[in-house]
Image (cartoon, coloured by chain):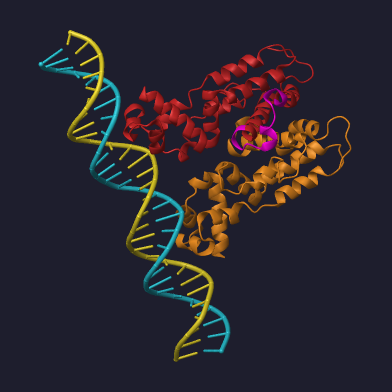
Chain colours: A orange, B red, C yellow, D cyan
Amino acid sequence: MTRELILDAARTLFAENGYDGATIRAIAQRAGVDPAMIRHFFGDKASLFAVAVASRSEVAVRLRAALSGEREGVGRRVADAYLHLWEDAEVGVALRALLRSGIEPGRPTEPLLAAIGASNGTPIPIGQVLAGTHLLGVAFARFVAEVPAIVVLEHDDLVDLVGPAIQRYLAPEGADGA
Amino acid sequence: MTRELILDAARTLFAENGYDGATIRAIAQRAGVDPAMIRHFFGDKASLFAVAVASRSEVAVRLRAALSGEREGVGRRVADAYLHLWEDAEVGVALRALLRSGIEPGRPTEPLLAAIGASNGTPIPIGQVLAGTHLLGVAFARFVAEVPAIVVLEHDDLVDLVGPAIQRYLAPEGADGA
DNA sequence: TGAACAACTCCACAGTTGGTGAATAACCCT
DNA sequence: AGGGTTATTCACCAACTGTGGAGTTGTTCA
């Protein structure tokens, strides 16, 4: 119960302020509990971050699903799925938190890397990685930096605009789908 | 003299650790001066950040130059110029610092926004903004997150890979250059 | 009734932060 | 040499950080 309150507050504040910016005390206050409860349930701040934010494997799953269909329209499909992830209440806030926290040594960053197309050891086509960089840039502009020209767009319109570029990266001329 | 030492140290640490992560004391120590010197020369931390990092108008200038030539090859040209900016010793470290610092209210972020195609009030073609998001994503992967698949590439190869996508955004079918 | 256990509160510690003010040293120009 | 500006050092503050310990409630089980 209060455990969930803490997790919710942690996700929100990590997303808004990044790892360093979100203090244990602020998280506790937002959750309406005593700061010591966080220590009681999660040990230390890094563990709280890991539990609250970094255990979102559905990112890779959902992206792989969008990627695995037929070649035609895969660009639109992946862009749509990616933006949906960022718009999702829990996943989006976790991704925001990861991005906001930046890449610092010792922090679990797998989901973010997966989100930009560079998951674990297996070699990934460079096109997928480049598509990931583009989508990450779009997400950064839309959800973190909040660039007006990007924020203003409807989800579907943005997908229409970005889709072709992603398509070109994921399915260039002449290749058979997975 | 020591002023320059402070600025150099500030740029480096802001780039490595972001705004909050770079402490006045750490900057002073790296510069080999007393922390009070920073106050003496720059007043407070925000002013130091502004002077050290946020006054890089050449970003917009260089990008506009790359953008203003003939339509053919503008994608390659802009991608090349953008990556060169990030590789430049001073400008690159400033851009890194801005990105690492994230977007927080009250901080000067014009150069970063300009870098992703959203400069001041004037309306900008959506294609330019999208090209900016892609380039920012690439820069993030290459210079901040240091995604292996991207870091490994040579500058020119990366330009070759990204150029066409930028080209499509900046010069779609049927339009006369500026 | 009472023991055991988890949930919870309160207070304090040691460390670091950004920022300040006063005192001292170095310098330059006349 | 002397005066004045600049550079530099040092001690200090209030605030905040993550963390830890000690003690209190409340519920459950024997």
- The location of residue B161, given as percent across then percent down, is 74, 26
Nearer-the-camera pick, A173 or A92: A173
Nearer-the-camera pick, A2 or D2: D2
Q: Which residue lies at the image location 89% right of the left edge and 37% below the top edge?
A: A176
Question: Does residue B103 appear anywhere in the picture?
Answer: no
Residue A38 appears left or right of A162: left
In the figure, D27 relative to A125: above or below?
below
The quadrant of the rendering that contains the C terminus of chain B is top right
Q: How many marks?
A: 0
In the figure, A24 relative to B57: above or below?
below
Residue A61 appears left or right of A8: right
- The location of residue A9, given as percent across then percent down, is 54, 54
- State the extent of the magenta-drawn residues as a range: B143-158
Question: Does residue A59 appear anywhere in the picture?
Answer: yes
> Magenta includes B155?
yes
In the figure, A83 relative to A29: above or below?
above
> Which SS type dominates the magenta stretch?
helix
- The location of residue A130, given as percent across then percent down, is 72, 33
- The location of residue A38, given as percent across then percent down, is 50, 60
The quadrant of the rendering that contains the N terminus of chain B is top left
> Magenta includes A2?
no
Residue C30 appears left or right of A22: left
Residue B37 appears left or right of A152: left
